[in-house]
Image: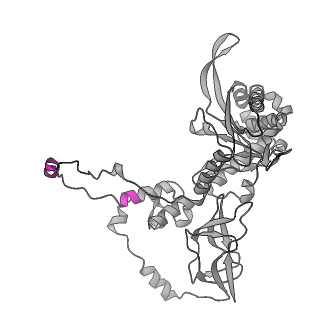
């Protein structure tokens, strides 16, 4: 009996995916529950498993194709099997092509060759587009990344040195192209996630009356608390005390005082959220993701730090769940981890506000009539002016500033 492999429900508001790669080939035996194909959605990669034991008899949608919920990806013949004899295995093994001088010279012999399962989805996609065997690409770390594949392709395609053509250049009436590798161009198809990010960022700017206001915060008090408590905090909770938990708590305190920033627009209505699901933007190799701290006002500092660390690890491994990315009432993004001093963050629709954090920098400031050096951070709040007035936006940032500069009040206000 034949069973179809179909595109499953993909999560909230996701109706389309891209076939990232097949984990099985036509004719391969599969077990019930075993992953057969990987789909790339705008948020996460999703493995689709076999419902029954059998053989993958047909692949109907190839890697790189866009698919919708319910569409057929392939067919499994239940109960069928195609055992491979020892002689067939031996023949397959002996038929494996030997490395050529071209690909063996593409990287150092000392490099560790990573298996395909140890490559990121982006790396696999780049390799497939360039018709490169991902198994041949050496990895600098534990997994093959996009940069590893691009370096491999560049080395493989490096042209042989050409003899000087002085006589041609001397007689040519116009400049002669040098073939300089610095003028190389490379065309790489955007991943579904990158395409979605591009569409939504443009959509946010076109559909919202977006405005940004700024302030600066003296980080001295928070830095002093972290220095004083970091050892005991780590000993007790097994995680470091970072800045994120302070700003999550401060943002919640400011949202409670300015509820329109914790809302969304639905038609002619403003929907005010009386719960605080705080999204934390994390930069991953495949693009920005925003996992959500549910009911963040009920979380302790340790719970917030633990959750953010886990989100960051899952984002790097590509294992973030759809549930972790759903919803959110307000977002915090930190460009300071990359060295940014100031930026204007873009809204994360349907949210109407986003808080941007930046690099802490020693700067001269006036305190009680004296110029002193303090660790300062610029903060930015982008908001939808359709329902958030400038007064509310400024008041929000001022409240965040007050809470961070006097962090003891976070125990009450946060």
Residue 20 vs 159, above or below: the answer is below
Q: Which residue appears farthest toward the top when viewing the image? A: 369
Q: Nearer the viewer, residue 87 or 255?
A: 255
Q: How is the model colour-coded? A: one colour
357 on left or right of 123: right
In this rendered view, identify the residue nearer to me: 331 or 157: 331
Q: Quadrant of the C terminus?
A: top right
Q: Is residue 227 visible?
A: yes
Q: Quarter of the image holding residue 375? A: top right
Magenta stretch contains residue 212: no
- Residue 333 is situated, as x and y percent measured from the top left of the image, at 67, 41
The quadrant of the rendering that contains the N terminus is bottom right
Residue at 35% across / 50% down in the picture? 183
Numbered marks: total:
0
Task: Name the residue at 73% across, 62% down.
Answer: 11
Residue found at x 48% / y 58%: 188
Instruction: Give the image quarter of residue 372.
Output: top right
Q: Position of residue 126 (x, y in %)?
A: 49, 61
180 left or right of 75?
Answer: left
Residue pictured at 66% horizontal, 65% vertical: 16
Q: Relative to 8, does residue 158 appear above or below in the rendering?
A: above
Q: Relative to residue 124, is residue 57 depicted above or below?
A: below
Judge whether residue 238 can be spotted in this image.
no
Residue 268 appears left or right of 30:
right
Q: Which residues are magenta?
A: 153-173
Q: Position of residue 54 (x, y in %)?
A: 66, 84
């Amino acid at each position: 009996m034949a069973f179809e492999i179909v595109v499953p429900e993909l999560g909230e508001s996701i109706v389309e995916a891209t076939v990232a790669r097949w984990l099985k080939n036509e004719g391969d035996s599969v077990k019930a529950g075993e992953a057969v194909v990987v789909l790339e959605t705008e948020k996460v990669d999703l493995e689709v498993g076999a419902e029954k034991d059998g053989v993958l008899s047909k692949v109907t949608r190839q890697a790189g194709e866009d698919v919708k919920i319910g569409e057929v990806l392939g067919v499994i013949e239940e109960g069928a099997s195609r055992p491979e004899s020892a002689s067939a295995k031996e023949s397959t093994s002996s038929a494996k092509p030997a490395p050529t001088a071209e690909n063996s010279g593409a990287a150092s012999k000392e490099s560790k060759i990573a298996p395909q399962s140890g490559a990121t989805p982006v790396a696999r996609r780049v390799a497939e587009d360039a018709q490169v065997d991902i198994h041949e690409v050496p990895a600098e770390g534990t997994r093959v990344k996009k940069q590893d594949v691009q370096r491999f392709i560049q080395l493989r395609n490096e042209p042989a040195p050409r003899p000087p053509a002085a006589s041609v250049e001397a007689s040519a009436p116009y400049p002669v192209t040098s073939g300089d590798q610095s003028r190389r161009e490379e065309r790489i198809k955007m991943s579904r996630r990158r395409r979605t990010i591009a569409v939504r960022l443009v959509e946010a700017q076109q559909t919202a009356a977006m405005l940004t206001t700024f302030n600066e915060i003296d980080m001295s008090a928070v830095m002093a608390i972290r220095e004083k408590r970091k050892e005991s905090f780590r000993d007790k909770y097994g995680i470091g005390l970072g800045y994120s938990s302070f700003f999550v708590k401060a943002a919640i305190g400011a949202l409670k005082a300015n509820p329109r920033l914790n809302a969304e627009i639905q038609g002619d209505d403003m929907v005010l959220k009386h719960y605080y699901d705080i999204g934390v933007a994390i930069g991953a190799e495949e693009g920005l993701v925003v996992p959500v701290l549910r009911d963040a006002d009920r979380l302790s500092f340790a719970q917030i730090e633990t959750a953010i660390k886990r989100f960051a690890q899952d984002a790097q491994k590509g294992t973030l769940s759809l549930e972790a990315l759903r919803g959110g009432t307000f977002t915090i993004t930190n460009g300071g981890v990359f060295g940014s001093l100031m930026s204007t963050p873009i809204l994360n629709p349907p949210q109407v506000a986003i808080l941007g954090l930046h690099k802490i920098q020693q700067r001269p400031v006036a305190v009680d009539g004296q110029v002193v050096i303090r660790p300062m951070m610029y903060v930015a709040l982008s908001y939808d002016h359709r329902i958030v007035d400038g007064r509310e936006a400024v008041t929000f940032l001022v409240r965040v500033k007050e809470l961070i500069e006097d962090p003891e009040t976070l125990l009450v206000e946060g």
